[in-house]
Image (cartoon, rainbow, N blue to C red):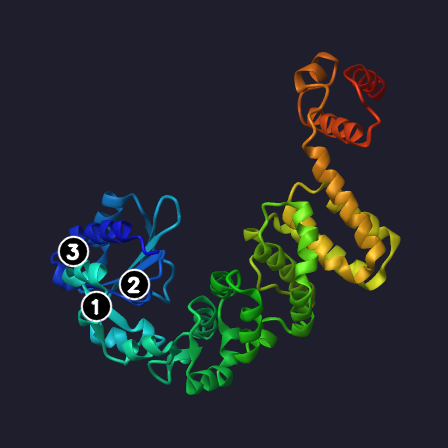
Amino acid sequence: MVNTTRNITIYRAIEKCVSSAKKFYLYGGCVRDLLLNRSFNDVDVLVSEPLDNIVKKFTEITGFHCFKPGRKFPFYRCVSPDKKFSVDFQEGELLRFLKSRDFTVNALAVRGDEFPSFVSSRESQYVIDLSGGLKDLKKGILKMVNSKCFDEDPVRLLRLVRYVVEIDFSPERATLLLARKKADLILMEAKERINNELDFFIKKNLGKALRWLEKANLFERLFPDASLSLFLKTLERFDEELLTAEKISPLMDENRVLIYYVRAMLFNHSRKEGFSYWPWWQVGPKRILKRAAMLIDRALKSRSAKSKEEIMEIVFNSRYPQLQAVTIIALHELGEELKRELIEASTFSTYATKIKPFLSGNTLKRMGVREGPLIGEKLKSLKMLQAKGDIKTEEEAKKWLQKDNS
């Protein structure tokens, strides 16, 4: 559902920052999504006056944090305090600007003073359309605005896949053919921009995203030597594997678990080339995730007892459920016996963490345990012993602690 109240509130704030409501336009994704009755988390604003004063006023009114993302794209991005909504301000002339957009469905604009009427009515009479975007919107087609579309910004290659996944549109044949032809351009872009764009759509529908990356000739360029068939095969049997993930953490949804798995496996391939296009810092501590991926890779190749022990340690002791999910799901190729051991260990570990220990932290301090990390380690060990049934009473817990401290 569209959040009309929020949209109007943001609009009123923008209106107060410009000299006239007739001198700014809202364009792009917000107009497209309003016509499709979809919610959106960002607004693009085009103004015909200097940006600095507008952005300064907008910050004062809304409390948004505003900054310039980079020299290549001279605009201001303003992000809400909760980081759930953003407004991009750009200066320029409307007609020239719309002709340089990526796809026709994104080359739609509404004049500032007409935006409230557009929000309430969603009528196309308020929409400025120079490229046939309204017609393509009704047909569900993604069509490039001009043939230089991907040369002007290679990240648009990924945006083509993003909109296929995100709004379920189909690329026009000529647009897809040009994208395939220009696929090498993506290698010229900064990893950060590629990471950001992939994260927009890879979570929406992973299987569809991977397939369309291949159709656009992007998969093999982003992940050289990686096997798409391996990931698609995993998707086919994922219902069974999801049961494993649910035992690890009931709060994890299907897409998140699978994303962690695919990221780990793609990392194993791409690290041979000395890079990884995946933003590890967004899914957990980079060092630990990197270690998990390498252990999985080693275990799949060697099946050694040492690898098994290291992986068991991750599953059993990890504070991060995504690591446990990555490890267990990726190890299905090691055989049912090992997988069963890992599941049992993980299930037991999760159960043990929910047990209330017989002794509290204060009790441990009174019994001579020094304050700090050691108390947490002792409590964790105590819970594990209680879960196994080795300690059944408070007295037994005290005797164990006295013996452990001696």
Q: Label 3 crowding class (10 Å Cα cut-off): few <14, some 14-19, many 20+? A: many
| Residue 57, percent from left and from top | 21, 48
Quadrant in which the N terminus is drawn: bottom left
- The amino acid marked with disc number 2 is Leu
Q: Label 1 crowding class (10 Å Cα cut-off): few <14, some 14-19, many 20+? A: few
Give the left or right position of residue 51, taking residue 337 as reference: left
Closer-to-camera residue (64/323): 323
Residue depth check, mark 2 versus mark 3: number of the one nearer the observer:
2
Closer-to-camera residue (84/74): 84
Badge 3 or badge 1: first in the primary sequence: 3
Badge 2 or badge 3: first in the primary sequence: 3
Q: Secondary structure at mark 2?
A: helix
| Residue 190, percent from left and from top | 49, 66
- The amino acid marked with disc number 3 is Val
Q: Whole-Å distance between the Cαs marked 3 and 1?
A: 25 Å
- Residue at which label 1 appears: 123
- Residue at which label 3 appears: 18
- The amino acid marked with disc number 1 is Glu
Outermost residue, right side: 305
Q: Quadrant of residue 123?
A: bottom left
| Residue 246, percent from left and from top | 65, 49
Q: Quadrant of residue 220?
A: bottom right
380 relative to 157, above or below? above
Closer-to-camera residue (38/81): 38
Quadrant in which the C terminus is drawn: top right
- Circle 2/circle 3 CB separation < 8 Å: no
Residue found 35% across the figure and 58% down from its top:
39
Q: Label 2 crowding class (10 Å Cα cut-off): few <14, some 14-19, many 20+? A: many
Outermost residue, top side: 366
Mark linked to residue 34: 2
- Circle 1/circle 2 CB separation < 8 Å: no
Q: Secondary structure at mark 1?
A: loop
